[in-house]
Amino acid sequence: MTAAPHVEDLLREHAPQVLGALVRRYGHFDASEDAVQEALAAAAQQWSATGVPSNPRGWLIRVASRRLVDELRSTEARRRREESAAAATPRDEFVTPPPGEARAPREDDTLTLLFLCCHPALTAASQVALTLRAVGGLTTAEIARAFLVPEATMAQRISRAKATMKSAGARFRLPEPAELPHRFRAVLHTLYLIFNEGYTATSGSTLHRADLSAEAIRLTRVVHRLLPDDAEVAGLLALMLLLDARRPARTGPSGELIPLAAQDRNRWDRAAIEEGVALVLAALPRRRLGPYQLQAAIAAVHDEAASHAETDWAEILGLYELLTHVSPSSVVNLNHAVAVAMVHGPAAGLDRLAGLDTDGALAETHRVDATRAHLLELAGDYDGALAAYHRAAARTRNGPERRYLQLKVAGLRRGSNQLAGG
């Protein structure tokens, strides 16, 4: 989608509402989604040249509906399905408005679409791709570029996701009350995964992908607007804002990684930090603590510290200990080990790392080796740190992370050679 920035923002805003209107009216999620993508592409080209129409959502619905009807009529089988659906009693999830009555797109269609895109029959990767396309309004090419895969590969992934949903009998409706908590966790986790890929890319030549982080924040804002009293939604939005606030200081002039301890905090986005902290303070007193609220509280302690040396590590450690009870995971255990090291010394932190190398979520990553290297360096075991940094550098697929780890290896080698020469 190539359009002026304000046009792109408008299209992103209307995409889920237009798709919701079509699916609610006609059914056929896969065909409706394709029609909406075509309408978005047409709008991106036309509006940039001639200006935005007075009713942009209505324009998109009209164009997408026309494309959809043409598609539904293109084969005999689709005509039979259309005629059969017209003769049958409309299902609750696909209610067609009476003749002459235009159904206004409902804002909660966005939430319904998120539930649909995060259907339990889909893999996490498919949930992310479908959410970005159907709810975020990104084209297949844009999603493919973000995840550094060929467009054809991403197109196949999205097509398989649609086929899986169809075979699983997914319907355009909110889940049953008993399903809601589990399905809602999947929605928040999908938004979290999108943000994380933007915050630190799993591969490629850049540390972060700001477009993905921004899209995750935008979608989470939509969910927060729809569910303003949900503390975990507020916590997730706060976490994203507090982490993204550091982005201007996370890389140097050549795109090199700058670790948290060395970042120029004057470059952090203070407006984002203030908003994030306000969300945390409002969310924490509500009901039971959740993992996103606690992670946001940890991020807030970091962001409010005037310098790395002034960070309240004791408070962070206490929050991590709560988090290990509320939402235990290998990643939480890894970060907890760092907090333990900062409060009780590197040896205590290293003890906490035992066994994490083979823990599922971390076994294939460089993160345990990188953390171990840092703690060994703090402990004065430079040979052990050098070996761990070397292993970590060999395992990461992100260019700036790899270069940073290689520089740590080179620095320790120089230091070792100078000591030997002295």
Image (spheres, rainbow, N blue to C red):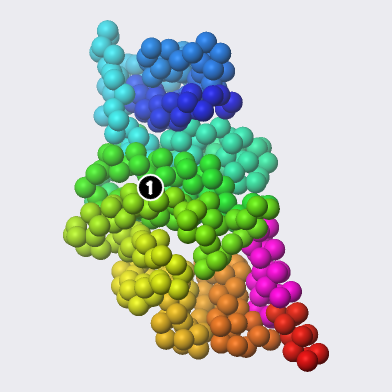
Question: Residue 110 vs residue 130: left or right?
Answer: left
- Crowd rating for badge 1 (residues with CA inside 10 Å; few <14, some 14–19, many 20+): few
**On screen, 335 above or below 120?**
below
Question: Residue 48 vs residue 145: left or right?
Answer: left
Q: Pick the quarter of the image with the N terminus.
A: top right
- Of 418 and 337, the residue lying toward us: 418
Question: Residue 89 vs residue 307: left or right?
Answer: left
Residue 291 visible to the viewer? no
Whether the magenta-drawn stretch holds residue 25 is answered as no
| Residue 235 x, y percent position in the rendering | 32, 55
Q: Pick the quarter of the image with the C terminus.
A: bottom right
Q: Secondary structure at mark 1?
A: helix
Magenta span of residues = 386-411
Q: Measuring 43% from the left and 26% from the top, which residue is drawn there?
A: 10
Residue 132 visible to the viewer? yes
**On screen, 389 above or below 85?**
below
Q: Measuring 25% from the left and 63% from the top, which residue is drawn there?
A: 289
| Residue 71 x, y percent position in the rendering | 52, 17
| Residue 217 x, y percent position in the rendering | 42, 44
Q: Measuring 56% from the left and 24% from the top, which residue is drawn there?
A: 3
| Residue 324 x, y percent position in the rendering | 36, 73
The quadrant holding residue 370 is: bottom right
Residue of label 1: 271
Q: Label 1 is placed on what type of residue?
A: Ala
Q: Main secondary structure of the magenta part?
A: helix
Toward the top, the furthest residue is 100
- Of 281 and 228, the residue lying toward us: 281
Toward the right, the furthest residue is 421
